[in-house]
Amino acid sequence: MTANRIVAIDGPAAAGQGTLARRLAACLGLPYLDTGLLYRATARRLLLAGADASDAAAAAEAARALSPPDLERTDLRTPDVDRAAAAVASVPPVRAALLDFQRSFGQANGAVLDGRDIGTIIFPQARAKLFVTASVEARAYRRWLELTGRGVHAALETVREDMQARDAADASRAAAPLRPAEDAFVLDTTVMDADAAFAAALRYVAARV
Ligand code: C5P
């Protein structure tokens, strides 16, 4: 049954869920989907079309028009896309347009998916649900290191403020707000390195998948 082969990973920005999800997928031999890319690619299409990120109708149209090359773009992790992705993610028709793709991705052979609403909305019946979190300071520092490493210059304070604004928007929106599923295993990675987080996650997931 598919629910037995779904690993749902949610959490706020830069808590380490991407790295963790990729490693779990490789270890379990499951496909991996970074669902944030769908919202980022929608946002990039919108910005390229010159539309405003708050234009709900244009955002829904961009989500419905997504195709595989949109997900392969190299400009999906820039600060302007960070902000626009959080805006389009609060539009219910955008979320509706992206729902089937996420479910079909997992339904055939199981999968590891990471995002904000995987354990609550996309696969509420998944047996393995992780909510990965960390303090805002730790997450902002990780994102700042990542941006700096890619040559994107930003002040740490600005990264922290942007991240807090994005988390607040994700947690307070009416459509699929960011929150742990009731049956999720909460993993706080504030003082954990990637190996320790992976070991803790694998212990939890291996007993369920
Ligand atoms: O995970 P990532 O930071 O790439 O996600 C970008 C944005 O997409 C998030 O800030 C959030 O607003 C949105 N998102 C979402 N639901 C998901 C994945 C991402 O609302 N499942």
Image (cartoon, helix red, strand yellow):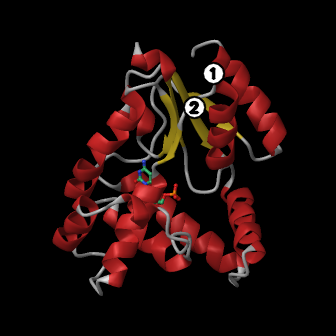
Asked if the residue at label 2 sits under 8 Å from ligand 1, the reply is no
Left or right? Give the position of 73 relative to 58: right
Q: Residue at x 72, y 20 (%)?
A: 203
Query: How many numbered marks does the figure carry?
Result: 2
Secondary element at tag 2: strand
> Which of the pair 190/149 is nearer the observer?
149
| Residue 178 shown left or right of residue 55 in the figure | right
* Residue 130: mark: 2
Q: Position of residue 124 (x, y in %)?
A: 37, 27
Query: Which quarter of the rendered picture does the N terminus lie within?
Result: top left
Q: Quadrant of the C terminus?
A: top right
Please give the label number shown on residue 124.
none
Q: Amino acid at mark 1?
A: Val
Identified at 65% across, 50% down, the residue is 15
How far across and down, in percent of the image, does residue 98 sit?
Answer: 30, 50
Q: Position of residue 79 (x, y in %)?
A: 54, 77
Query: Along the line of sight, which residue is nearer the eye, 91 or 78?
Result: 78
Q: Nearer the viewer, residue 118 or 187?
A: 118
- Label disc, if present, on residue 205 of the rendered structure: 1
Q: Residues within 10 Å of mark 1 (few under 14, many from 20)?
A: many
Q: Residue furthest front?
A: 69
- Please tell me whether mark 1 or mark 2 is closer to you in this view: 1
Disc 2 crowd, CA 10 A, few/some/many (<14, 14-19, 20+): many
Residue 136 image-quadrant placement: bottom right
Q: Is residue 111 above or below residue 58?
A: above
Question: Which picture quadrant has residue 195?
Answer: top right
Under tag 1, what secondary structure? helix
Residue at mark 1 to residue at mark 2: CA–CA distance: 8 Å
Query: Which is nearer the N-term, disc 1 or disc 2?
Result: 2
